Amino acid sequence: MVNGEELKKLGLFGSLSQTQLAKLAGATETIKYPANSSIYMSRERAARLFIVRDGLVSLRLFDPGEGPEVNFGTRAKGDLFGGASFMKPQRYTVTATCLKPTELIVIETSHLWDFFQDDPEFGYRFMKEIAQLYFDRYVTAIGYLAESIKEPTRIMAQPG
C-alpha cells in the first residue's frame, strides 16, 4: 500500500482531500519487477492501472510474424500507463516491459470506478488524463506511419 502523501505528489492526485487520498491509497499495492521482465503483454485482459514509482518501462507493440515493432516510448517515475483497463474490450494494446529494475504503484481499475462514483469531478479529470495518454500514442503512431511511407521499400523482380 502507498501512503496518501506519496499519491498527492503525483500531479493527477494533487487536488484530492486527505480523506480521498487515504481511500485511494488503501486500494493500491506496490510491485517490484526485475529488469527485462514483462508487466503485461499486448491483448491480455486489462484490469489494472500502473504508476512508475521507480525504474523505467518500455511500451511496445510487437506481434511476432505480424509486422514491425512500434515503440510507444517509455514511462519513468510518476508516469501512468495501463489506461486500456478503462476502455472496452479491456485488453492491453501494447506490451509493457521493464528496462531496468522497476517498482510500480498498482491500482485495480474496479476500485477506481468506485472512487469515481463517489467523486465524479475527479473521475472526469482522471479520464481526461487517460484520453490525453491515448491521443499522445495516436500522434506517435501517425509519426511512425509517416516515416515508414517516406521511403518505401522497393521490391525488384529478377528476370527468369
Image (spheres, rainbow, N blue to C red):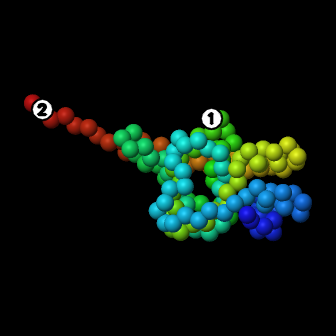
Q: Do the CB atoms of the residues marked 1 and 2 lie less than 8 Å apart? A: no
Q: Residue 89, located in which quarter of the rendered image?
A: top right
Q: Residues within 10 Å of mark 2 (few under 14, many from 20)?
A: few
Residue on which the image places disc 2: 159
Q: In the structure shown, which secondary structural element does the residue marked by tag 2 occupy?
A: loop
- Mark 1 or 2: in front is 1
At x 81%, y 45%, the residue is 114
- Which residue is farthest top? 160
At label 2, the amino acid type is Pro
Question: In the picture shown, does residue 136 fall above or below 29?
Answer: above
What label does residue 134 carry, if any?
A: none
Q: Is residue 138 visible?
A: no
Q: Secondary structure at mark 1?
A: loop
Residue 44 in the image: above or below residue 11: above
In the picture, measured across the screen, residue 86 lies left or right of residue 45, that is right
Number of callouts in the render? 2
Mark-to-mark CA distance, 1 and 2 = 49 Å
Task: Identify the residue under disc 1.
Answer: 89
The crowd level at tag 1 (other Cα within 10 Å; few <14, some 14-19, many 20+) is few
Under mark 1, the amino acid is Pro
Residue 112 in picture, x, y percent from top left: 77, 48
Query: Which residue is at 46% across, 62% downward?
Result: 36
Q: Is residue 50 left or right of residue 158?
A: right
Look at the picture and state if 31 lies above or below 118: below
